[in-house]
């Protein structure tokens, strides 16, 4: 499928070089925004996604170098997420993030020392994340070295995981009451919110990972109706834990992505 992009500063060289990293995406670059639909935006901040249906100043743009996500990464040490994934003094398990999305959670986990293999199946989200990772690597943000990223559907891959923790954060059902952030509105419009994640959980539970963790809205039903052994609750979300064995030293090592090819 072809996507549309706008490059107002005509940064053809830097744009083409960066897009070589996302070979799955073909973008027709235009001088001005289209009248409808989503489109990519390229400027000195790198790749972003905008929508003709929203104010043109708003965009989905991942930034691990400055801004809110960079601050979150630095601030987190022992929040519900890291406890749920089994991070404890002296132990940083290797994580397979099977639903990488915008990379918010995995950047926190990599920053505290976890090796992360991240997978994202949506070509647009994957390109936005890949470009953000490129910029963070260029800025020599240390945690990036612990992240390996693949644009793929993780369902087939997770059953082959041999150790560590599998983390699933499938798209939440659309909120009816509170207006979600613009990036969530765009993401919901772009992604199929009703994506079936039950099969992903089944595949993860079939693996040799020490633990599978699922992030859910506080009051949501259990994914696939599968009752977890325990839960860790945050302010707005909870983590359902499906342990298969105790985490140990063997769970530290990075996941060999070649083994999944
Ligand atoms: C709620 S978002 C994840 C947010 C992420 N945890 C973060 O902190 O930014 C869910 C993402 O999972 C992706 N996804 C869902 N099923 C997937 C699958 N089987 N393989 C790869 N990605 C998947 C969706 O495309 C979407 O981008």
Image (cartoon, rainbow, N blue to C red):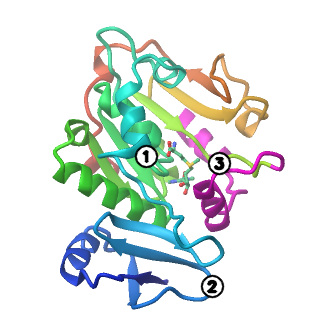
Q: Secondary structure at mark 2?
A: loop
Label whose residue precedes the other's in the sequence (3 or 1): 1
Q: Is residue 197 visible?
A: yes
Q: Is residue 137 magenta?
A: no
Q: Secondary structure at mark 1?
A: loop
**Dot 3 crowding, Cα within 10 Å, few <14, some 14–19, many 20+:** some
Task: Examine the rendered structure and indicate whether residue 197 appears above or below residue 191.
Answer: above
Relative side of 27 to 238, left or right:
left
* Mark seen at residue 197: 3
Looking at this rendering, what residue extends furthest in the right direction?
177
Q: Which residue position holds label 2?
A: 36
Label 3 within 8 A of ligand 1 by Cβ: yes
Query: In this view of the protein, which residue sits in the foreground, 99 or 129?
Result: 129
Q: Quadrant of the C terminus?
A: bottom left
Q: Secondary structure at mark 3?
A: loop
Label whose residue precedes the other's in the sequence (2 or 1): 2
Label whose residue precedes the other's in the sequence (2 or 3): 2
Label 1 within 8 A of ligand 1 by Cβ: yes
- Residue 156 image offset from top left, x and y in percent: 48, 52
Relative side of 54 to 253, left or right:
right
For marks 2 and 1, give the one nearer the viewer.
2
**Disc 2 from disc 3: Cα separation:** 30 Å
Query: In this view of the protein, which residue sits in the foreground, 61 or 258?
Result: 61
For marks 3 and 1, give the one nearer the viewer.
1
- Residue 53 image offset from top left, x and y in percent: 66, 75
Residue shown at the point (35%, 23%) measured from the top left: 93
Q: Which residue position holds label 1?
A: 103
Q: Which residues are magenta?
A: 176-205
Query: In this view of the protein, which residue sits in the foreground, 245 or 190?
Result: 190
**Disc 3 from disc 1: Cα separation:** 18 Å
**Disc 2 from disc 1: Cα separation:** 27 Å
């Amino acid at each position: 499928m072809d996507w549309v992009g706008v490059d107002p500063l005509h940064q053809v060289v830097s744009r083409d070089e960066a897009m070589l990293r996302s070979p799955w995406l073909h973008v027709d670059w235009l001088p001005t925004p289209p009248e409808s639909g989503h489109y990519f935006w390229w400027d000195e901040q790198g790749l972003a996604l905008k929508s003709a249906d929203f104010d043109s100043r708003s965009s989905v743009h991942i930034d691990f170098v400055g801004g809110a996500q960079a601050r979150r990464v630095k601030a987190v040490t022992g929040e519900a997420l890291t406890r749920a994934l089994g991070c404890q003094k002296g132990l940083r398990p290797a994580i397979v993030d099977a639903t990488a999305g915008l990379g918010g959670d995995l950047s926190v986990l990599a920053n505290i020392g976890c090796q992360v293999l991240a997978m994202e199946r949506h070509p647009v989200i994957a390109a936005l994340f890949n470009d953000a990772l490129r910029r963070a690597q260029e800025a020599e943000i240390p945690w990036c070295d612990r992240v390996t990223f693949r644009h793929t559907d993780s369902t087939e891959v997770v059953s082959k995981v041999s150790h560590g923790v599998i983390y699933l954060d499938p798209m939440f059902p659309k909120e009816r009451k509170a207006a979600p952030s613009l990036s969530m509105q765009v993401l919901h419009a772009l992604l199929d919110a009703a994506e079936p994640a039950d099969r992903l959980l089944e595949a993860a539970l079939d693996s040799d990972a020490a633990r599978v963790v699922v992030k859910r809205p506080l009051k949501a039903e259990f994914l696939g109706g599968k009752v977890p052994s325990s839960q860790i609750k945050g302010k707005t979300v909870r983590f359902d834990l499906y342990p298969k064995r105790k985490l140990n030293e063997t769970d530290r090592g990075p996941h060999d992505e070649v083994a999944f090819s």
